[in-house]
Image (spheres, helix red, strand yellow):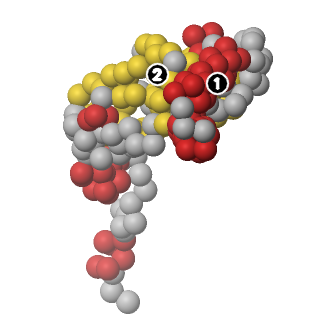
Amino acid sequence: MFVTGRAVAVAAIGLIAVLLLPSWGTAWGWLAVVTILMVVDVTLSANPRGVVVERQVTPVVRLGESGISTLTLHVPEGPRLRGRVRDAWTPTAGAGQNRHDLTIPPGERRRVRTPLTPIRRGERRANLVTIRAEGPMGLAGRQASREVPGSLLVLPPFHSRKHLPSRLALLREMDGRSSVMTRGQGTEFDSLREY
């Protein structure tokens, strides 16, 4: 269970009632009303444990390049899920903007994409996927985390990529697989001929 800022704001509104009617009964009564509203909100929220989550990751990237982690979320049944998803990765995976707000009606799927720009070589593994489902009033909700495996292999940078086309062309020329823009056989005899 988690509590939103809206629940704190509703509880703060109760301070006005306490200032107008200063007694312990007013304070405890308002706190009981806010607590009951939060319990009802949590009860009416979607169950985040019932969400089916699949992950697809760019398998290999070079250091300095970016990959993408795509989460597909499916709510098979129950109420509409309104909340937030966090696609957690290790810090060296460079997962920026890994929190996504979404709304999923029952029976539908949604995809969220997290850009990955790793800062170290090696294999980067995904951490937990956390789903927060808010209730209809937005006061509180349910939260669940689960492991959805995924990894990103980061290879060393390839700085000489810009030289690759010219080197391949030179190899093809030496191999005889490309046409060469030079004079062919027979032209040297024309230069020896007297006119």
Count neighbours of disc 1 (C-alpha within 10 A) and say few if under 14, some if 14 to 19, many if 20 or more. some
Q: Residue at x 50, y 24 (%)?
A: 2
Q: Residue at x 31, y 56 (%)?
A: 162
In the image, residue 59 above or below residue 181:
above
Q: Residue furthest bottom?
A: 195
Query: Any mark on residue 129, and which?
Result: 2
Count neighbours of disc 2 (C-alpha within 10 A) and say few if under 14, some if 14 to 19, many if 20 or more. many
User: In the drawing, does residue 152 fall left or right of residue 108?
Assistant: left
Q: Is residue 162 visible?
A: yes
Q: SS for tag 1?
A: helix
Give the Cα separation between the discs numbered 1 and 2: 33 Å
- What residue sits right under mark 1 in the picture? 33
Q: Are marks 1 and 2 in contact (CB under 8 Å)?
A: no
Q: Position of residue 163 (x, y in %)?
A: 28, 56
Depth order, front residue of 86/111: 86
Q: Quadrant of residue 90?
A: top left
Q: In which quadrant will I find the C terminus? A: bottom left
Q: Quadrant of residue 104?
A: top right
User: In the drawing, does residue 195 fall left or right of residue 4?
Assistant: left
In the image, residue 96 above or below residue 88:
below
Q: Position of residue 158 (x, y in %)?
A: 26, 45
